[in-house]
Amino acid sequence: LEGPGIETRVGFAAAPLPADFSARLAANRQLFPLGVDLILVAPGAVLGLPRSARVIGEA
């Protein structure tokens, strides 16, 4: 991940995600100022993903 508020690139792994997850995030970003932010939750972990974040590499 990279984007505003992320000092350096940050990695994360989450599964299962849709095969077109990166495309969905990109489409959502194009809706600005509309659209939604994303919160991923797992046991012992929470990741808030703003619309402005960019996924680098595989999703």
Image: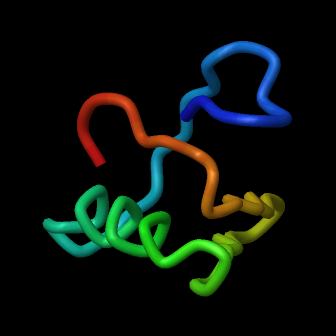
**Corner quadrant of residue 39:** bottom right
Do we see residue 10 in this rendering?
yes
Q: Position of residue 37 (x, y in %)?
A: 67, 75
Q: Position of residue 9 (x, y in %)?
A: 61, 19
Q: Is residue 17 above or below residue 59?
A: below
Do we see residue 16 in this rendering?
no
Q: Is residue 8 left or right of residue 13?
A: right
Q: Is residue 2 above or below residue 51?
A: above
Q: Position of residue 49 (x, y in %)?
A: 68, 59
Q: Is residue 15 left or right of residue 38?
A: left
Q: Is residue 24 above or below residue 9?
A: below
| Residue found 55% across the figure and 29% down from its top | 11
Q: Nearer the viewer, residue 43 or 18?
A: 18
Q: Nearer the viewer, residue 32 or 22?
A: 32
Q: How is the image coloured?
A: rainbow
| Residue found 59% across the figure and 30% down from its top | 2
Quarter of the N terminus within the rendering? top right
**In this view, which residue lies farthest toward the left?**
19
**Corner quadrant of residue 44:** bottom right
Q: Nearer the viewer, residue 1 or 34?
A: 34
**Corner quadrant of residue 32:** bottom right
Q: Position of residue 59 (x, y in %)?
A: 30, 49
